[in-house]
Image (cartoon, helix red, strand yellow):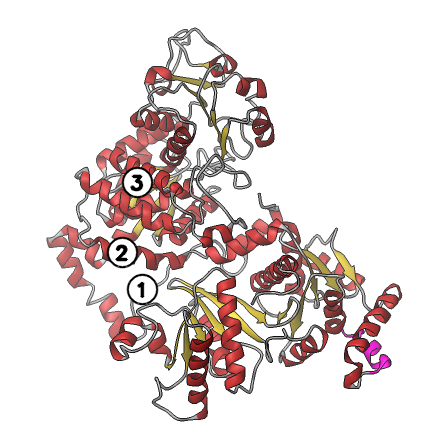
Amino acid sequence: MSTITKEAALEYHREGKPGKIEVVPTKPYSTQHDLALAYSPGVAYPCKEIEKKPEDVYEYTNKGNLVAVISNGTAVLGLGDIGALAGKPVMEGKALLFKIFAGLDCFDLEVNENDPDKFISIVKALAPTFGGINLEDIKAPECFEIERRLKEECDIPVMHDDQHGTAIISAAGLLNALEIQNKKIEDIKLVVNGAGAAAVSCTKLYIALGVKKENVVMCDSKGVINSSRTNLNGQKREFMTERNINTLAEAMVDADVFLGLSVKDVVTTEMLQSMAPNPIVFALANPDPEIAYDKAMASRPDLIFATGRSDYPNQINNVLGFPYIFRGALDSGATMINEAMKLAAVRAIADLAKLPVPPVVNTAYDMTDIHYGRDYILPKPLDPRLLTTVAPAVARGAMESGVAKRPIQDWEAYDEKLRKLMGYDNKLMRSIFDQAKSKPKRVVFGEANTDNMLKAAVIAKKEGLIIPILLGNEEMIEKRAQRLGLDISGIEIVNLRHDREAPRRKRYATKFVEKRQREGLTYPEAKEKMFDRNYFGMMMVQEGDADAFLGGTYSASHAIGQIATEVVGIRPTYNHFAAMHIINTKRGTFFLADTQVNKDVDADTLFDIARLTRNSVEYFAHKPVMAMVSYSNFGSSSEPECCHSREVVNRMHERYPDLLIDGEMSINYALNTDMRDKTFPFNKLNGEAVNTLIFPNLSSASTAYRMMLEMGLGDAIGPIQMGLNKPIHYISVNSPVRNILNLAVVAGLDAQVLETSGGLIDR
């Protein structure tokens, strides 16, 4: 699992605008006319329509896309009863997950009230605002009554995710595990350790799927819940067994399935060995399971094992369910989330795990052959198909069970809507981070004596993303780190001006002269260049003393680019190198080039840029759909700039017959698929949405991506250098820390690919 430090977490939550979510207008508001429509007097008209016909609230407001995450902070995961105010960061986080995974707007509401009746009254009074209510982190047994009452008294979906989220996901895993282990659900013996909200909900759902109640043994901290126990609450009495057993160890004998929602290390290897053949163990205690993964797997070769952790196979993760369950419920106008909808979600999640896994998922987890089996009983959380699989299943469940007030009529259009929503989730960057962690590489930070570069290096080290090497004066870097409150212990610092590095400078100078002596370079000149941190850092990579270099620029970047061509050179099949920015927006991921390198662009330069960008888009697990952008459209201008773009399209079609590329075209036609295909039906993009934009010159490309960022239209990764022989990247030292970190991780990933490809980055 990712190493999370207190300092990193606090900085994440307070940097920029404090917190994790914000409200963004969805209608024009720039003119007085706009404001008059938005508020007075225009707002009176939808109010009157809703007064006459309450259902119109879904047509004129965001109620149908708005979820509330509501908690009183009495059972915050891993923290306990910390109160409503202290629980707010958790609720904000849940709101963020709703947005990025399902495109649902979400308000977090922390209610400072522990009395169940008063809490219910408050939430019920707030319900008209929302399309659905996600109850969160409310302690048992009060949570059962709170959810029951609110489901009865509200006409919108209400779900306590702590109960039902784990139940739905683990039930999907159970169905697949039973299939793999060749067991029938009606025959299995189930042991449940833990008797809280999640355990009770899981057990009830398993019974709904076919587990026989008499085959269930539930344990709490005092042992088996049996008929000899007194003072049991109603929830526990429901699962009381008549068997004459008292301990977890006794219950485990000949059991087929163990479900743990308790505490770590309560299960022993002896207990696992006493279970029936081909056992299934879901050890879901957080953050450490009831038995360690390694111990469990060593004890039984026939075992299927799942935990709540991301660093082991078969993670039972609620994020597989709740965003998509609420998505389907709201989209169908469901008045509740009932058993039929939950069972529909269970089966949809289970069935998805059996389908072939697309390359983007393998890439996200740095694997090559994820497939249905003992180590893959559930889809991965980053599988984009969850949205288009689970939400429709839930919506159908709502319709078939008669609770959908706005049944979906056009399923094809609904599927298209869901596909567009995928753009909210930055799966690409998370997949890059995950792959980088699998084998961290040594990345040299050329400007480690600047605040943001140093912060990025420290974060990367703590996260295990790369192994940073800092170029600079040790004393100055240490003082800067102390001022910034950064821990740089364990990070290598290389002072290229220090005497102890003199032999390295001499070695680098010698190697550099050998490479460029036929270009007039002398040894004294080369030795002098090695006092420059860019030359020195790149030579570290060239000579194998580091794996990648991240330089820092203060204004113009052409000088460092020129140094890169001198030291590591351009790939032999190209005459130019270029830079690309990846922009993640709610419309999806876009690739823009050339955003940094080539000022003077002719057809040959543009051809290299297009080739490099095509390779890079595929490298990042996307199918390139490319538009050559200009101010003209398909030959409407004979200016050289437009002719270059048309020539490149022809050359790209000749070299890559299956590649989707066309142009030249203006940006509006590139981004508006319907308008482009209607106006220019002969274009070769065949109804595909463009994700790759090749600009005719550096000015237009740089302006485009900077404008998008400044207007808040997306987040950037880049500039990513394409076409150099080694992983050499550079970025402004004044860039946000996150942008520097992202590029450092990309540099490390390049180094991984360089190593495995035998010395060639395939970009």
Which residue lies at the image location 49% right of the left edge and 50% below the top edge?
Answer: 362
The quarter of the picture where the N terminus appears is top right
Does residue 378 lie above or below 480 as drawn? above
Q: What amino acid type should be assigned to the residue bearing mark 3?
A: Val
* Label 3 vs 2, first from the N-terminus: 2
577 vs 519, left or right, is left
Nearer to the camera, 572 or 313: 572
Nearer to the camera, 133 or 657: 657
Q: What amino acid type should be assigned to the residue bearing mark 2?
A: Asn
The reply to whether residue 637 is visible in this rendering is yes
Answer few, some or many: residues within 10 Å of disc 1's Cα (few below 14, many 20 plus, some between 14 and 19). few
565 vs 381, left or right, is right
From the image, state whether disc 1 or disc 3 is nearer to you: 1
Q: Which residues are magenta?
A: 522-532
Indicate the position of residue 333 as horizontal and vertical percent values. Answer: 21, 47
525 is within the stretch colored magenta: yes
Which residue position is annotated with label 3?
123
Indicate the position of residue 384 as horizontal and vertical percent values. Answer: 40, 52
The circle on residue 26 is 1
* Label 2 vs 1, first from the N-terminus: 1
Q: Magenta part mainly helix, strand or loop?
A: helix
Which residue position is annotated with label 2?
62
